[in-house]
Image (cartoon, rainbow, N blue to C red):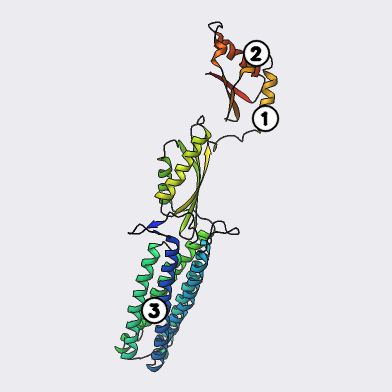
Amino acid sequence: MGHDHHHDHAVDDDGNALLTSSQRYKDTIRVTVIGSIVDFLLGIAKIVVGFIAQSQALVADGVHSLSDLVTDVAVLYAAKHSHQEADEEHPYGHGRIETVVTVGLGIALMGVSIGIMIDATHRLFNPNTLFEPGILALTVAIISVLAKEAIYQYTMMVARRYRSNMLKANAWHSRSDAISSIIVVIGIIGSMAGLIYLDSIAAIGVGIMIAKIGWDLAWHSVKELIDTGLEAERVKAIEKSILDVDGVETLHILRTRQIGADALVDVHIQVDSHISVSEAHYISEMVRGKLINEIEEVIDVMVHIDPEDDEDMPVIEKLPLRQEMMTKMETAWENVGEATKIEKITMHYLQGKIQIELLLPLAILHNAQPDAEKAVKQRFKQALANVEEITDVSIHYH
């Protein structure tokens, strides 16, 4: 998938950096091409032998194998395009192409299963259409079962390695072909033994199973397209990882979404309201790095810093920004002598109001009365009492 710039690069035994994204692309292409070659050869073999051995089911099974070729081509297309880097039009990459194709594959699986069930039901009610093929048809059907199961296992192995729902869908396509070949095997053995209904009943049962697989895959991907979050246990793991970072007091508004095999996270973290901007930013960077390293599917995190829990806070009235506040304060304290000596003013926007911290030189307390410190604070407090946005004034000396 296209997020090379987000992924930490994997390192092989020689210490060379491997691009996991391009490796994923190559493996997806390889497994799909091998599968499509097998589909093509099996499809042709089953149709030819089906005609020779007069096995209606084997011909139908051959058509099923060839229909898998269509889905193989769709997977190759999606793998090529979802692998592209993020660009201006698609800042989050192209991973969702894989998701859309997975929906299509799921629907195709459901279609195949309905076809199998209709065909089997039709044969049940028309005994004269039940076939009596022989050993040649049986051999090809058994070869098909083994070949398609092997392709299923191989595709599934790659799908699990890269957490690719699209490859899982295609693997189940291969297994559905293997299953429909098992039906043919059961049917051929049954008809050779005189139990001509056996294959049709088995076909209906298997059709239902394939439909369920198709539905699950399609539904999962549709949910991803409408930005359904990660499963509850993954969200819990993300929460725990964030809260383990020193400096994070609590978190709220944690949102996740998937793009193909990857996930994005948005979170609001609450930090001490009086730490510096740079410390708060550093804490947020630690949260981001930790999640990307610890939670396998997470490739990017947007961290919002809160100095207080703003979830239950009333909507903050529009407070003035620094320039406007300075004008108000300077007007208010113009008669306070010490105001000319202020070296630094810090404003804390908390609980819908502003707390003011003033830094004054220690020198102004020299040679003054013993309680000068108190008197200075009192003068500033009185001067600022009429500035409604201010809740508290504290004074520090250095």
Front tag of 2 and 3: 2
**Residue 128 drawn at (x, y percent):** 41, 91
**Residue 98 drawn at (x, y percent):** 50, 65
Three-letter code, disc 1: Gln
Dot 1 crowding, Cα within 10 Å, few <14, some 14–19, many 20+: few
Residue at numbered disc 2 = 337
Asked whether residue 95 appears in the rendered view, the answer is yes
Determine the secondary structure under disc 2: helix
Residue at numbered disc 3 = 180
Residue at numbered disc 1 = 323
Kindly check if marks 1 and 2 are in contact, taking CB atoms under 8 A apart as contact.
Answer: no
Determine the secondary structure under disc 1: helix
Residue sitting at x 67%, y 19%: 386
Q: Earlier in the sequence, mark 2 or mark 3?
A: 3
195 vs 292, nearest the viewer: 292
Front tag of 1 and 3: 1
Three-letter code, disc 2: Gly
Determine whether 193 is above or below 287 in the image. below
Left or right of 12 on screen, residue 318: right
Dot 3 crowding, Cα within 10 Å, few <14, some 14–19, many 20+: many
Q: CA distance from mark 1 to mark 3?
A: 75 Å
Quadrant in the rendering for residue 56:
bottom left
Determine whether 261 is above or below 364 in the image. below
Quadrant in the rendering for residue 246:
top left
Q: CA distance from mark 2 to mark 3?
A: 93 Å
Kindly check if marks 1 and 3 are in contact, taking CB atoms under 8 A apart as contact.
Answer: no
Determine the secondary structure under disc 3: helix
Asked whether residue 172 appears in the rendered view, the answer is no
Q: Earlier in the sequence, mark 1 or mark 3?
A: 3
